[in-house]
Image (cartoon, rainbow, N blue to C red):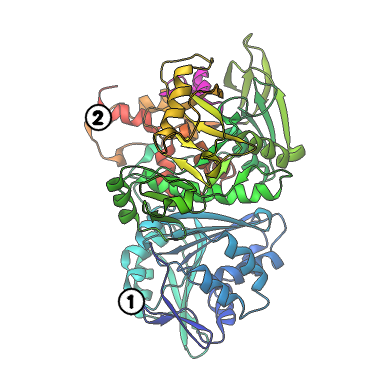
């Protein structure tokens, strides 16, 4: 995906691809207010609801969003939340946004906040928070039909702002109108600058009551309208249709004080929730999250896949979270050094050509230039992840606990099981005594989630990993960035490198292995001969990663396994999805686990996903990704393959 090509004419941006302007010359703000805010009867409709959702086709220069956010913050109740979903297949470059910001001094502070958070041109949904979470921008870079099909939340007001129908017909098709209608709440509205007869007929056929109204400037007419009834649509995956749960109080119990649990806690605390965090250890991050250093790396496959889409978007979100948390920390824990991925040259070239990333996001560096980037002579090609780096994971977890403040209560205790009774979850010890009760519980204790009866069916395992803490040498001290190959190494910090990591199934030993220490050292010395001292006695650390059967994280609502097996026992027959009811999920129970070796990338977005489910908000990722992470996937696959 590449940035949009824009020409500027007297301060007005013009798309060379579509031959149209982004807004009317000299009057963009007034046009936005008239066409979109006033015609959707905003901000009058913001007075009562605690949450309002606006969706837009065509983010463009972000002008509609900026004007809407400014108006929202000035007129909506302080406790209300705005979700602004915007779709664009051709994102505008940050440099063009900066140029635009200078034209309207009253908008410059808002653009100044947006531009540093603006995502790279990577397909998928990007979540950006403003004003302490009062405004959330769900920025989707994607084809319009695919993006609309991935929305799984009802929209209160639409801004239909693609280029003119005669210049960009893809944005104004019958399928687009149908998808807009099916995701609009009853009583929801739309507005658009165009008065095209084809657009009017298309929206009417989709179910909107459409009217002409006074246009802006030289345009005589525009269209606006409402939808007053929702048609029935068949869900092609009813087992992944998630229920909404309501809670009497904003309090959740989270079991597991590693990165997954703390990321979930932080996401809920930002929404005004109180958290009781339980862990068997007396401090946070005593398990795999206690590692002194780890590389922030996405997982990229050779072919564009849902897995790569998830990990790339999770990685972009993690960078945003780490940047934010570092500003709240006294000591550095997040080091934006960049990371390089070393692999087979043909594989790397295929990856790079397949995804066509922007050079300021992921770039291809050949063997002649890798030394200038990494500081050492790798004598091979690599991919440079420009904005990546390494993290002191233990310190990150401590920062997360601290930023949650008084909203988080930490209790050291061992939990044996959880059981639901009389509308609440009972957290029990080994004597089956109830330690405490809660309506909302998040399980985030790695592979140990299987000890709970509600998840004893989940196919995950704990995989042993051993890190090596190696002293720097004259060669290794020159390393400028993280290097990832069969093993990874961080730049030296206070004279030491972190090298990792082994991957040992069916090994529960917590003792350091001399063989694995040597394998870690040899893996790095294979990249650069004699870079690390192979004769010394380096320190190390053993921890256990939770890994799922399909190597994908598990995050979301916990299904009722027994009910699923009854509801979908004959899936193997291949009957149409319309014959099945929506899935049954355990009220108020969520899970975040199996983050494996990529937890630094996946834990933050998983925490946001769970918090959005708990609070009934629009998801921070595509619907396909929500389903991809859903723990119920394992039950459905099993039932599809054979008789129950």
Q: What percent of the width, then of the height, locates residue 431?
A: 64, 8
Q: Is residue 474 above or below residue 191?
A: above
Name the side, left or right, on which 560 lies relative to 31.
Answer: left
**Please, which residue is most extreme toward the bottom here?**
218
* Neighbourhood count class around disc 1 (C-alpha, 10 Å): few under 14, some 14–19, many 20 upward: few
Image quadrant where one finds the C terminus: top left
For mark 1, what is the residue? 198
The Cα atoms of the two marked residues, 1 and 2, are separated by 44 Å
Q: What percent of the width, then of the height, locates residue 515?
A: 44, 18
Q: Is residue 249 something that shows in the picture? A: no
What secondary structure is found at the residue carrying circle 1?
Answer: helix
| Residue depicted at x 42% and y 71% | 4
| Residue depicted at x 65% and y 37% | 494
Q: Is residue 403 above or below residue 487?
A: below
Magenta range is 441-462
Q: Earlier in the sequence, mark 1 or mark 2?
A: 1
Q: Nearer the viewer, residue 469 or 71?
A: 469
Q: Nearer the viewer, residue 364 or 441?
A: 364
Image quadrant where one finds the N terminus: bottom left
Tag count in the figure?
A: 2
For mark 2, what is the residue? 572
Q: Is residue 266 above or below residue 356?
A: above
Q: Is residue 365 above or below residue 173?
A: above
């Amino acid at each position: 995906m590449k940035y949009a090509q824009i020409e500027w004419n007297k301060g007005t941006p013009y798309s060379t691809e579509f031959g149209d302007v982004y807004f009317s010359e000299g009057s963009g703000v007034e046009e936005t207010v008239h066409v979109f805010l006033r015609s959707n009867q905003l901000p009058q409709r913001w007075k009562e609801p605690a949450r309002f959702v606006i969706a837009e086709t065509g983010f463009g220069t972000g002008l509609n969003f900026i004007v809407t956010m400014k108006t929202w913050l000035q007129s909506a109740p302080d406790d209300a939340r705005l979700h602004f979903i915007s779709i664009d297949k051709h994102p505008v470059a940050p440099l063009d946004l900066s140029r635009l910001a200078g034209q309207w001094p009253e908008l410059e502070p808002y653009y100044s906040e947006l531009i540093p958070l603006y995502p790279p041109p990577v397909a998928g949904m990007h979540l950006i928070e403003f004003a302490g979470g009062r405004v959330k921008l769900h920025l989707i870079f994607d084809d319009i039909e695919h993006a609309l099909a991935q929305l799984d939340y009802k929209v209160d007001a639409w801004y239909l702002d693609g280029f003119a129908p005669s210049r960009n017909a893809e944005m104004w098709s019958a399928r687009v109108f149908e998808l807009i209608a099916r995701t609009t709440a009853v009583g929801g509205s739309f507005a658009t600058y165009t008065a095209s007869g084809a657009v009017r007929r298309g929206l009417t056929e989709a179910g909107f009551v459409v009217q002409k109204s006074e246009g802006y400037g030289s345009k005589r007419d525009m269209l606006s309208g409402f939808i007053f009834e929702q048609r029935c649509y068949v869900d092609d995956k009813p087992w992944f249709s998630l229920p909404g749960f309501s809670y009497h109080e904003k309090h959740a119990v989270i079991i597991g004080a590693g990165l997954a649990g703390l990321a979930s806690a932080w996401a809920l605390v930002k929404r005004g929730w109180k958290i009781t965090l339980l862990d068997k250890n007396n401090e946070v991050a005593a398990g795999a999250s206690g590692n002194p250093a780890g590389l922030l790396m996405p997982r990229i496959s050779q072919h564009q896949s849902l897995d790569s889409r998830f990990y790339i978007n999770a990685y972009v979100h993690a960078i945003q979270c780490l940047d934010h948390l570092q500003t709240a920390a006294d000591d550095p824990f997040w080091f934006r050094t960049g990371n390089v991925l070393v692999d087979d040259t043909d594989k790397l070239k295929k990856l790079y050509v397949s995804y066509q990333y922007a050079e300021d996001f992921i770039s291809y560096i050949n063997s002649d230039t890798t030394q200038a980037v990494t500081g050492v002579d790798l004598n091979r090609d690599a991919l440079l992840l420009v904005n990546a780096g390494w993290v002191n994971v233990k310190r990150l977890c401590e920062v997360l606990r601290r930023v949650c403040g008084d909203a988080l209560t930490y209790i050291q205790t061992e939990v044996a099981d959880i059981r639901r009774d009389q509308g609440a979850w009972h957290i029990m010890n080994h004597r089956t005594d109830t330690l405490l009760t809660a309506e909302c519980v998040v399980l985030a204790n790695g592979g140990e989630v299987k000890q709970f009866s509600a998840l004893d069916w989940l196919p995950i395992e704990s995989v042993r990993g051993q890190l090596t803490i190696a002293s720097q040498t004259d060669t290794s001290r020159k390393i400028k960035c993280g290097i990832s190959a069969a093993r990874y190494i961080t730049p030296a910090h206070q004279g030491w490198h972190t090298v990792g990591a082994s991957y040992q199934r069916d090994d529960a030993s917590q003792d350091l292995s001399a063989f694995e220490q040597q394998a870690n050292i040899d893996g790095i010395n294979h990249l650069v001969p004699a870079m690390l001292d192979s004769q010394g006695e380096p320190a190390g650390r053993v921890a256990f990663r939770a890994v799922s059967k399909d190597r994908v994280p598990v995050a979301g609502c916990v299904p009722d396994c027994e009910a699923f097996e009854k509801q979908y026992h004959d899936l193997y027959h291949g009957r149409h999805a319309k014959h099945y009811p929506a899935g049954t999920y355990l009220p108020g129970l969520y899970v975040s686990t199996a983050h494996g070796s990529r937890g630094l990338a996946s834990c933050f977005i998983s925490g946001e996903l769970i918090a959005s489910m708990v609070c009934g908000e629009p998801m921070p990722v595509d619907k396909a990704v929500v389903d991809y992470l859903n723990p119920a996937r394992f039950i459905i696959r099993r039932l599809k393959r054979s008789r129950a």
